[in-house]
Amino acid sequence: MSDNTTYTPPRVWKWEPGNGGQFANINRPVAGATHDKPLPVGKHPLQLYSLATPNGVKVTVMLEELLEKGFSAAEYDAYLIQIGEGDQFGSGFVEVNPNSKIPALMDHSVTPHQRVFESGAILLYLAEKFNAFLPTDPAKRTECLSWLFWQMGSAPMLGGGFGHFYAYAPEKYQYPIDRYTMEVKRQLDVLDRHLAENRFMAGDEYTIADMAIYPWYGALVKNRVYEAAEFLEAHTYQHVIRWTEEIDARPAVQRGRMVNRTWGEPGEQLPERHDASDFDQLPINS
């Protein structure tokens, strides 16, 4: 495939509403709230406002892992933010995250109440709050945080780059698809080489680095995002697949993937979560 169309940027770029593919209706070049909408507040100290995209899954997995580990103070309410409908631009959400991206967390157990935004920051905040899933050994802690920040820096190339041009862009052009495909395959190779010698990202210990990377790259090799596994030859990254399958088997991960989910099998969807018993109400998939 080749494309001979060229684009000459204007001297000053002008925004054209509606230009941008599948998510054009929620993309804009300015920040701030578009409407007045307070956020609901449930009964637990931790209030999560999110959607089960890879970035959202990071946090619900972390919270469920904390509960699995016996931290009752990690009980939480998870409210659904429908990004396709612009919920992230409501005044209440913007107060929690001025960047208008999910997930966003409010911790009501401290005074004043603490907002936390950016998925990696939320993982680190919770790990430090509960002293869990973050190694205490300085060298291992540094390794964990290096991989956490690797994911935060790499995912935009996967989501906003490859995912957009391969799956969502209104037109398919070879150059951006080739460019981002090359980078995503390089990232998968980075992971595969590392996981060839390590059970988890920070060695033998399951940490927030795994929780950050798994929802993106694990989903990618398992064909859960972008339907690009064949295109990327995902089957060749055997160590990433092994790691993904081990994490897939964790009960807390299975629950975390359901929270704030509104697509897929009915038994995999829990749009809002306010109590552990909510999972018992899910229908059984046929």
Image (spheres, rainbow, N blue to C red):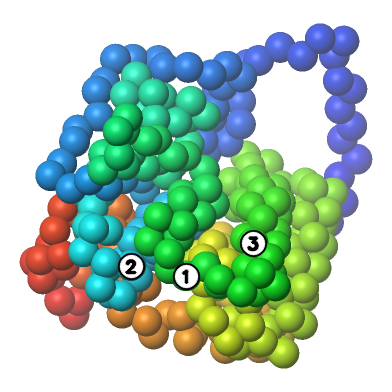
Viewer can see residue 202: yes
The circle drawn on residue 119 is: none
The circle drawn on residue 66 is: 2
Query: Is label 2 in contact with label 1 (beta carbons under 8 Å)?
Result: yes
Count of numbered circles in the view = 3
Residue 204 quadrant: bottom right
Tell me which amino acid carries mark 1: Phe
Viewer can see residue 224: no
Rounded to the nearest angstrom, the CA distance separating label 3 from label 2 is: 19 Å
Q: Identify the residue at image location x=54%, y=52%.
A: 120
The circle drawn on residue 145 is: 3
As drawn, 242 above or below 109: below
Residue 282 quadrant: bottom left
Q: Is mark 2 on a helix, strand or loop?
A: helix
Residue pointed to by mark 1: 133
Is 121 left or right of 153, judged from the image as shown? left
Rounded to the nearest angstrom, the CA distance separating label 2 from label 1 is: 9 Å
Q: Identify the residue at image location x=55%, y=72%.
A: 135
Tell me which amino acid carries mark 3: Leu
- Residue 114 x %, y %: 37, 36
As drawn, 277 above or below 22: below
Of the image marks 3 and 2, the number of the one nearer the N terminus: 2
Q: What element carries label 1?
A: loop
- Residue 245 x %, y %: 49, 85
Tell me which amino acid carries mark 2: Leu
Is 152 left or right of 73, judged from the image as shown? right
Q: What element carries label 3?
A: helix
Q: Identify the residue at image location x=45%, y=60%.
A: 127
Closer to the camera in the image, 49 or 261: 49
Of the image marks 2 and 1, the number of the one nearer the N terminus: 2
Query: Is label 3 in contact with label 1 (beta carbons under 8 Å)?
Result: no
